[in-house]
Amino acid sequence: MPYKTSDNQYRIKTKPSKYAHFMQAYKIRTPKYKFYLERGGNEGDPIILLIMGLGAQSLVWSNLFCQELINSGYQVIRFDNRDIGKSSKLKHKNKLTKEYKSVSKKLALLSRFKLGLPLHIEEDSIPYTLFDMTEDVHQLLNALEIEKCHVIGMSMGGMIAQILAAEHPDRVDKLGLLATSNNKPFLPPPRIDALRALTKPIPQTKDATKIIENNLNLQRVIASPDFFDEKRALKRTKLLYNRRFYPIGVSRQLLALLATGSLVNIDKKIKQPTLIVHGSKDRLLPPAHGHSLSRTIPHADFKLIPGLGHDIPDTLARYLADLFAEHFR
């Protein structure tokens, strides 16, 4: 199928998604990068843009969650951030990315970050920040000719969503934040088991079984403990590994998050009605992070979900989707 060009800066190619029968897959070329995106729902319905978190491919927004939003009368868009999944991989090579592959270096950075201390990172050695990733989202909206939409961001994606709502207020109607933070200094750190799983080195092997088990273990640790489904998690982990495994991108996204720092001043600029949803069992970003957001963002409502971890378990997918769908009405 030939490229559809809505503007000479953007090129779009579409075909049916092989991951969800109710969605179309898009390959979008913006002025700087290429992005993989999926879109579903009835043309003319309000649009919800989903922004995923650190190292997570767009399919982590489960088909069940997306379908429920569509059934509620919305179009849904999910996409791979830069350096993840089927979107562009940066060729940026620098000493920082290599130096901070070790667990000790990552922990040192994270510790200083949580205490609000300078990271002593040279600006020219950082591949990009969350502000650059926010500009990616802005360019995608331009390419799709979407003037305004609702936005849900999860984890790091929620941080990008905060910046988008503050810096491009004309593009965001209402805002939804799930399992995320404004990175205010002195907020509780991840639980030690979650921190270890997050910073554990990727096995230096071509053995897919070991890599998949490593990724599955991270899910076990951060997922909703009462709703974790081992078989479904394993199936999805294999799917994501085979779709596109790119651990270097995860390291670069982590550096982008750390280099961006606190979003407290960004939050004060957010004017859109905002729903903040957080899990009582989130071991990666404890509930205090959600409470911090609710105290900082004007016009924000906070909902604590008993038993929810740092994930969207199938058992709660419809309930969570309905919360956001109602907020956006």
Image: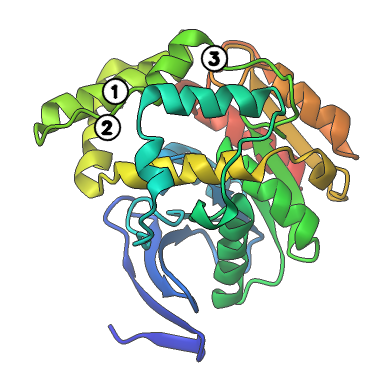
CA–CA distance in space, label 2 to label 3: 20 Å
Q: Nearer the viewer, residue 106 or 181?
A: 106
Q: Which residue does the numbered mark 2 point to in the structure image?
A: 237
Q: Residue at x 49, y 53 (%)?
A: 125
Q: Amino acid at mark 3?
A: Arg
- Is residue 10 positioned above or below 155 on the image? below
What secondary structure is found at the residue carrying circle 2? helix
Q: Nearer the viewer, residue 109 or 272?
A: 109
- Is residue 172 positioned above or below 224 on the image? below
Q: Residue furthest left?
A: 207
Badge 3: few (under 14), some or many (20 or more) residues near its Cα, within 10 Å? many
Q: Quadrant location of residue 87?
A: bottom left
Q: In the drawing, does residue 169 fall left or right of residue 91?
A: right
Cβ–Cβ under 8 Å for marks 2 and 3 = no
Q: Amino acid at mark 1?
A: Leu
Judge whether residue 199 can be spotted in this image. Answer: yes
Q: In the drawing, does residue 293 fall left or right of residue 194?
A: right
Q: Nearer the viewer, residue 297 or 42?
A: 297
Q: In the drawing, does residue 187 fall left or right of residue 43?
A: right
Q: Which residue does the numbered mark 3 point to in the structure image?
A: 283
What secondary structure is found at the residue carrying circle 3? loop
CA–CA distance in space, label 2 to label 1: 6 Å
Q: Residue at x 53, y 11 (%)?
A: 191
Q: Which residue does the numbered mark 1 point to in the structure image?
A: 216
What secondary structure is found at the residue carrying circle 1? helix
Cβ–Cβ under 8 Å for marks 2 and 1 = yes
Colour scheme of the rendered structure? rainbow
Q: Amino acid at mark 2?
A: Thr
Judge whether residue 223 can be spotted in this image. Answer: no
Q: Position of residue 50 (x, y in %)?
A: 56, 49
